[in-house]
Image (cartoon, rainbow, N blue to C red):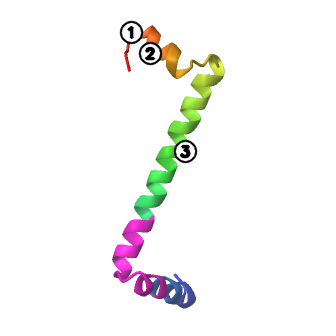
């Protein structure tokens, strides 16, 4: 990383009262989580696109014999 990038990262970590390592760890896992969420959202949308039928909450309750 460049000296400027390191300076910015260090300022960010200091602002949030964490070590530089912790800032990078959090950023990495946030990125992983976002990619994971995106993957499963795209998968769910593809599945929905095959059959876009939706049901209201009342219909689901009736289908599964669920009472309030």
Find residue 31 and report its horizontal and vertical position in percent.
48, 58
- Front residue of 9 and 48: 48
Q: Residues within 10 Å of mark 3 (few under 14, many from 20)?
A: few
User: Is 46 a magenta residue?
Assistant: no
SS for dot 1: loop
* Mark with earlier residue (3, 1): 3
Q: Residues within 10 Å of mark 1 (few under 14, many from 20)?
A: few
Residue carrying label 3: 38
Which quarter of the picture shows residue 21? bottom left
SS for dot 2: helix
| Residues drawn in magenta | 11-27
Q: Is residue 10 above or below residue 36?
A: below
Q: How far apart are marks 3 and 1 (CA)?
A: 33 Å
Left or right: where 21 falls relative to 54: left
Q: Is residue 53 above or below residue 24?
A: above
Q: Distance between the residues labelled 1 and 2?
A: 6 Å
Which quarter of the picture shows residue 48? top right
Which residue occupies 53% across, 86% down?
A: 8
Which residue occupies 40% across, 75% down?
A: 23
Find residue 4 and report its horizontal and vertical position in percent.
57, 89
Q: Distance between the residues labelled 2 and 3?
A: 29 Å
Residue carrying label 2: 61
The reply to whether discs 1 and 2 touch (Cβ–Cβ < 8 Å) is: yes
The reply to whether discs 3 and 1 touch (Cβ–Cβ < 8 Å) is: no
User: Is 21 a magenta residue?
Assistant: yes
Q: In this view, does 2 lie above or below 27?
A: below
Q: Which of marks 2 and 3 is in front?
A: 2
Find residue 56 and report its horizontal and vertical position in percent.
56, 20
Residue carrying label 1: 65
């Amino acid at each position: 990383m460049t000296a400027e990038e390191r300076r910015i990262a260090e300022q960010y970590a200091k602002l949030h009262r964490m070590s530089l390592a912790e800032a990078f760890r959090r950023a990495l896992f946030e990125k992983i989580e976002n990619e994971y969420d995106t993957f499963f959202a795209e998968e769910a949308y593809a599945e929905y696109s095959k059959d876009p039928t939706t049901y209201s909450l009342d219909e689901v309750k009736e289908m599964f014999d669920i009472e309030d």
